[in-house]
Image (cartoon, rainbow, N blue to C red):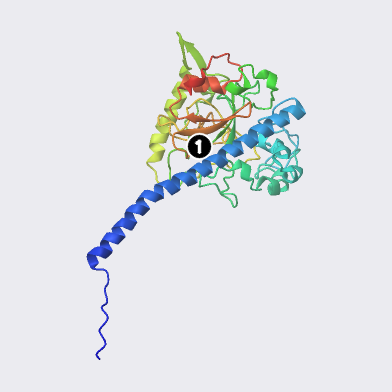
Amino acid sequence: MKRPQSSRSGFTLIELLVVIAIIAVLIALLLPAVQAAREAARRSQCINNLKQMGLAANTYQSANQSYPLRNATNTLGNSAGAIAASSWGNFSGQAMMLPYLEQTAIFNACNFNLNPNPSFLPGGPMNSTALNAKIAAFLCPSDGQAITTGSGIRQNNYHGSMGTTTDPWFGGGATGIFAHTISYDVSAVTDGTSNTIMWSEAVVGNNNPRVNKRTSVGTTGTSSTNNMLNPVVAAGTTVALHANVQAGLTACNGIWAAAISSTTGTASNRGQFWGIGSPGYTFFNTVVTPNSSQYPWSSCRTDTNAGADFASFINANSNHSGGVNMAFCDGSVKFIKDSISPPTYWALGTKSGGEVVSADSY
């Protein structure tokens, strides 16, 4: 008998295209969900980092009866290698908190008598091992551009609050928790620890190419009028920024508008070193609201230098949608929306301003 021939069937071209289209639609539906889940995990890690820093600062305060200094004056080392006093580029509050972040080995490698800045001798080379160490607690996983090795190092995403103070060199204190050469006890926080910002996140600097939130700018030498202990002044029944500071912000925007048209530039040093107590490296102020579209730059020095370090305006920002994570003095971490009103933000930045802040205002 003749064996029956087996019939073979397959996909037609149309059927194959339909299957591919269905798979593409499923991927398009699932990919945002996967990305959202990953961002949620990154945001959770960021919150955990800030909680660790808040706990470390409060443990430091309990042990030393004060929060850490923003930066101190050391007695040895300058750019020429000579013995001299220097308050520029010294160790940060983050460096002082290292034992309370389970980083005692790195803390012991720091020579706090010598300026750690790489350009200062002999402290720079002697402190290079500690200063260049990667510390996960200082890096937000949502940033994506942190660099922890090499000459372009950018290794700090968490900055301490100077409050509304715009004078980076003012030796008489600050409206926030961290001040130049001065430390505060918790008793100084008369506004309440749950109403006072201590730490915030910020993306690291990068001017190549120039983009929002990562670029630092410098104006034409107006720091003498822009730098104030507290630029928030009464305007009838409301509050506003002092006219000189507002003029400084406007000048920064003018420089920014010119700079953004350039596709290249010197790299911004925002967040360069966790171990150096310079505004812009490790500290910020609460003058410009988070992720501001009105003032889109990362920081602005109101002198002729465009570096982020010792800038007058240093903004909080993040890659999280809609706002930034901030740690308060009571150890809590709250998500501060981009839409927060400036007066509320200024009030949360000050430790003893006496403002009344409603819990539903941010």
- Secondary structure at badge 1 equals loop
Q: Is residue 277 in view from this perspective?
A: no
Q: Position of residue 282 (x, y in %)?
A: 60, 36
Q: Is residue 99 above or below residue 337?
A: below
Judging depth in this view, the residue of 199 and 268 nearest the camera is 199
How many numbered markers are drawn?
Answer: 1
Q: Quadrant of residue 10?
A: bottom left
Amino acid type of the residue that numbered disc 1 sits on in the rendered structure? Ala
Residue annotated with mark 1: 306
Residue 188 screen position, x and y as percent: 67, 18
Drawn side of residue 258 relative to residue 347, left or right: left
Counting other residues with Cα less than 10 Å from the Cα at mark 1, is it few (<14), some (14-19), or many (20 or more)?
many
Horizontal side of 175 relative to 143 (left or right) equals right
- Image quarter in which the N terminus is found: bottom left
Q: Is residue 160 above or below residue 30?
A: above
Q: Looking at the image, which residue is at 68% across and 34% down?
A: 56
Image x and y of residue 303, in percent:
52, 30
| 37 left or right of 175 in image | left
> Residue, x 71% and y 36% (percent of image)?
96
- Work out whether residue 120 or residue 80 is closer to the camera in this orientation and state it: 120
Q: Nearer the viewer, residue 64 or 226?
A: 64
Q: Residue furthest front?
A: 1
**Going 70% across and 36% down the picture, which residue do you hit?**
97
Q: Is residue 150 above or below residue 234?
A: below
- Residue 223 can be seen, yes or no: yes
Asked whether, in this view, residue 195 is left or right of residue 181, the answer is left
Residue sticking out furthest to the top: 236
Report the front residue among 49 and 41. Answer: 41
Residue 257 is situated, as x and y percent measured from the top left of the image, at 38, 35
Q: Is residue 154 above or below residue 173?
A: below
